[in-house]
Image (cartoon, rainbow, N blue to C red):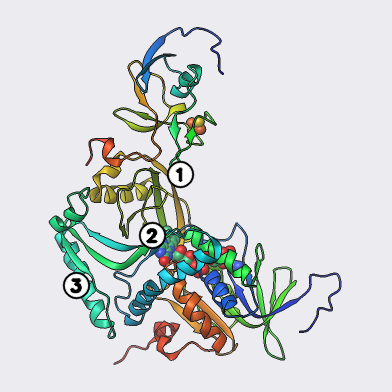
Amino acid sequence: MFKRLSEPKAPVTFEFEGQPLKGEAGESIAAALLAAGIIDLRRSGEDDSPRGPYCMIGNCFECLVWIEGQGSRQACREPAREGLKLRRHPGRPDPQAFGGGS
Amino acid sequence: MASSTLGAQAPTRSCDIAVIGGGLLGSAFGWGLARRGQVCQVFDEGDTAVRTARGNFGLVWVQGKGLGMGRYARWSLQASRLWRGFADELEAATGLDLAYSRGGLRFAHSEQDLQATVNNLKQIQSDMVEEAYQFETLEHSALKKRLPLVGDIAGATFCEHDGHCNPLMLLRALHQDMQRLGATYRPNTKVERIEPLAGGGYRLLDGQGERLCEAEKLVIAAGHGSRALAEQSGIELPIHADQGQVIVTEKVASAFSYTSDIIRQTDNGSFLLGASSRDVGMDTRTDLSTLGQIARECVQVFPFLRQLRMQRAWGAVRVMTPDGFPVYQHSKSYPGVFSFACHSGVTLAACHALEAAQWVIDGAIPSDFDDFHPKRFHVQASI
Ligand SMILES: Cc1cc2nc3c(=O)[nH]c(=O)nc-3n(C[C@H](O)[C@H](O)[C@H](O)COP(=O)(O)OP(=O)(O)OC[C@H]3O[C@@H](n4cnc5c(N)ncnc54)[C@H](O)[C@@H]3O)c2cc1C
Ligand code: FES
């Protein structure tokens, strides 16, 4: 669906649902996932339907993704980094899964 | 019915009762009156008005209400008793889900705090004369048993009469159903003047002097807009603004099945944290120091909240009376003009709709509710 105009100059490797992916250091996670053909980043907290990035500028919260060790994050506002482990956001995560704190 | 002679101008429509304000109080009255067969019109200013009905916390709250006025404690308990049936009726008529559920905790951070709450509740019980509401005192370990996620706080008091709902759905249900019952809802219409008519009844006019309607009786329930209207009708209305801010978190799985006065989880999974209380006039802006204070207090109760992302926050202003108790009155000089003001419009919606609407039809507020008259504010000091 989306095609990179050029190969990453500073490639980073990260994972989504256990699948290794490549992105450009500093580009947003959302951009990297879209370039990899992954548009289904989360489940809706209302009706469990699949959702993905929409505005790409931090406004709509459609792009929420689960970053291991961090929890819910807007994929369009987080830079892709080497070694990130991402999961599809479950919509309504169990607060106990957030770790720490409690 | 007199027909309009104004030709091209907007027709003067007449009705039994005109309700000024379409927020939580006005809508409850409009619905309650339409449900009792009254021909009524509900006037509601537009989006720029201060509209508390759209900024509240959604509690149907009893615990602690009425310290110093038994009448108010009993009225709040009555609201809670009526609420289930009230919600059922609105849900059946509209198909909307008001998300009403019960069981409320007031968390106490310290032992002194817990003791003070218990003392207050006992005082209220003894003031209630008639049947008082019950509560349970939960020390830390008893609370932890019920709520394993609770942090290191002294305890809580639990009251089965407390509850919460989706207040936006409540407002929408009242609006939708009052119109089904025949009430006319007139949005974007600010009432500026009230004129008594020679043959009885009143005429309402807007800012341009345009006639809006003629009515036999009036209910002034316009929140912060009430004062200016009440003054024209010989009614004293001592209200001021009390600002509250609320934090909304991301949605998470169900983690708190009760409600509390500062933390509740909505039916769609968000946590609402709040609400502060500040005397800053008609200011609905949020500020970091207030939001930080709210967050700190709530994280002490449920440490897991620290991990949640805040999604947004808002500010709104309560309609507050000098002693915090409702102000209800029927004008002496303008018979048939009633005014109602209070800060717990969600809680009392059931009472306003199912009981107080009848007072307006009867033409008098029962003497049992004399405590709610503002004459209580000018008691002369005795020697
Ligand atoms: C932060 C916060 C939290 C709260 N939490 C709770 C809670 O948990 N439980 C609870 O029970 N209560 C709560 N409240 C209080 C509750 O929201 C209010 O009691 C209630 O909204 C007041 O209703 P009202 O109809 O008097 O005013 P509003 O709801 O403000 O409605 C007034 C209406 O009158 C209209 N109006 C004004 N002037 C005119 C005019 N001249 N002509 C025509 N229309 C006019 C306005 O457009 C508005 O729609 C909270 C309030 C705040 C601020
Ligand atoms: S895509 Fe809209 S906030 Fe990220």
Q: Marks 1 and 3: same chain?
A: no
At which x and y percent is residue A92? 38, 41
Measure the alpha-carbon separation of dots 2 and 3. 25 Å
Which residue in the structure is indicated by mark 1?
A46
Asked which secondary structure carries label 1, the reply is: loop
Which residue in the structure is indicated by mark 2?
B278
Judge left or right: residue B309 versus residue A32.
Answer: left
Q: Nearer the viewer, mark 1 or mark 3?
A: 1
Amino acid type, mark 2: Arg
Pointer 2 or 3: first along the chain: 3
Which residue in the structure is indicated by mark 3?
B119
At which x and y percent is residue B348? 43, 72
Ligand 1 is within 8 Å of the C-beta of the residue at disc 3: no
Whether B82 is drawn above or below A38: the answer is below
Q: Residue at x 41, y 70 (%)?
A: B83
Q: Residue at x 27, y 79 (%)?
A: B132
Q: Nearer the viewer, mark 2 or mark 3?
A: 3
Q: Chain of mark 3?
A: B
Whether A97 is drawn above or below B7: the answer is above
* Callout 2 crowding tier (Cα within 10 Å): few <14, some 14–19, many ≥20: some
Amino acid type, mark 1: Glu
Q: B198 or A88: which is nearer to us?
A: A88
At which x and y percent is residue B226? 55, 72
Measure the alpha-carbon separation of dots 1 and 2. 34 Å
